[in-house]
Amino acid sequence: MLLDNNIFSGKIVLLGFLYLHSFTSVVTAEKEKSAEIPKYEIVDKYITYAGATGDVLAYMSKPVKPGIWPAIIVIHDKDGINDEIEEITKVIASHGFYVIVPDGLSQIS
């Protein structure tokens, strides 16, 4: 059964925003609590995938350990994918998430 966009889309976006917002404050405090938070070694890279009007560039980060990981889609701001977005993505992935940031500007240039 496909997900009904009317039911889930708003909740998924809100959950993603709240989770990402909480990580921006956690990144600083993380160094103090590093022994308490489980961490995974990660792999990160730029990838491309087929979009509706052509290839889309995206930044991906995930744990190296094989497994089924929950996924988070990060949406960048008007500046596109920058160092801060990459760092946030790596931190989220190090806690056991598959994270992808589609580059909304990749088809414009």
Image (tube, grey):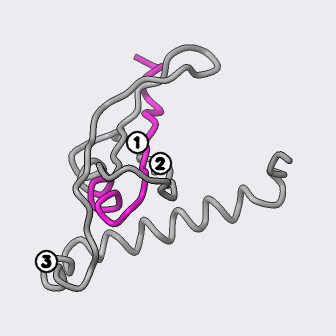
Q: How many other residues sit within 10 Å of disc 1, few (<14), some (14-19) or many (≥20)?
A: few
Give the secondary structure at mark 1: loop
Q: Are marks 3 and 2 in contact (CB under 8 Å)?
A: no
Circle 3 — which element? loop
Q: Give the residue type that dot 2 points to.
A: Ile
- The amino acid sitting under disc 1 is Lys
Query: Callout 2: few (<14), some (14-19), or many (20+) C-alpha neighbours within 10 Å?
Result: some
Q: Is residue 14 left or right of residue 26?
A: right
Tell which of 98 and 106 is nearer to you.
Answer: 98
- Quarter of the image with the C terminus is top left
Crowding at mark 3 (Cα within 10 Å: few <14, some 14-19, many 20+): few
Give yes or no for residue 98 being in the magenta stretch. yes
Relative side of 100 to 88, left or right: right
Closest to the observer: 77 or 44? 44
Left or right placement of residue 1 versus residue 27 in this view:
right
- Residues at marks 3 and 2, CA–CA distance in whole angstroms: 25 Å
Q: CA distance from mark 1 to mark 2?
A: 10 Å
Which residue is painted at 64% across and 61% down in the image? 12
Q: Position of residue 93 (x, y in %)?
A: 34, 57
Give the residue pinned by disc 1. Answer: 78
Dot 3 corresponds to which residue? Answer: 31
According to the picture, the residue beneath numbered tag 2 turns out to be 75
| Label pair 3/1, CB-CB below 8 angstroms | no
SS at circle 2: loop
* Residue 72, percent from left and from top: 49, 55
Residue 95's spot in the image, x, y percent? Answer: 33, 66
- Residue at 61 percent of width and 15 percent of height: 53
Identify residue type, mark 3: Lys
Point out the stretch of residues depicted in magenta. Answer: 88-109
User: Relative to residue 60, is residue 42 depicted above or below?
Assistant: below
Q: Give above or below for 18 relative to 54.
A: below
For residue 66, which numbered disc appears in the image? none
